[in-house]
Amino acid sequence: MSDVFPPDIPRDDPDRFIRCQEAMHIGFAAFVDRAIAVGWSADEVLTAIIELADNHALTLAANADLDAALDVLKRPRG
């Protein structure tokens, strides 16, 4: 998915989420099409993407929790 465009609106813009989807759409559709072209069904591809996204979100959250715990441990005692 190399056809992703950078954000062109501020983080607090109410349309930012939809703009992110628009920025990723072309690359995402091409990625899905390539997976289907090599033999995976559309249902398999989309289900796998959902599962991958969920697992990735869980990993990011776990990493953030670990970073916060490490920050607490690194603080000077006293």
Image (cartoon, helix red, strand yellow):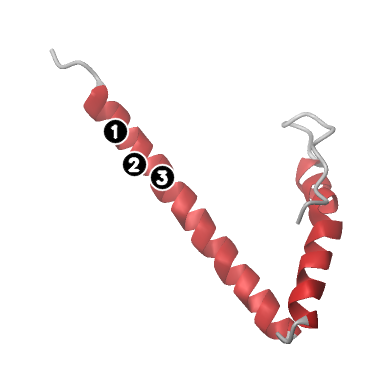
Q: Position of residue 60 (x, y in %)?
A: 48, 48
Q: Amino acid at mark 3?
A: Asn
Label 2: how many Cα within 10 Å (few below 14, some 14–19, many 20+): few
Which residue, as the protein is rendered here, is positioned at the far front? Answer: 38
Q: Amino acid at mark 2?
A: Leu
Residue 29's place in the image compared with 77, above or below, is below
Residue where numbered disc 2 is placed: 66
* Location of residue 42 with respect to 74 vertically, above or below: below
Q: CA distance from mark 1 to mark 2?
A: 6 Å
Nearest the camera: 38 or 6?
38
The residue singled out by tag 3 in the image is 63
The residue at the point 83 percent across, 66 percent down is 30
Which quarter shows the N terminus? bottom right
The residues bearing labels 1 and 3 have C-alpha atoms spaced at a distance of: 10 Å
Residue drawn at x 83%, y 45% is 19
Q: Is residue 60 left or right of residue 4?
A: left
| Residue holding disc 1 | 70
Residue contact at pointers 2 and 3, CB within 8 angstroms: yes
What kind of residue is marked 1?
Leu
Query: Does 29 sit left or right of 73 as displayed?
Result: right
Whether the residues at callouts 1 and 2 have beta carbons within 8 Å, the answer is yes
Q: Residues within 10 Å of mark 1 (few under 14, many from 20)?
A: few
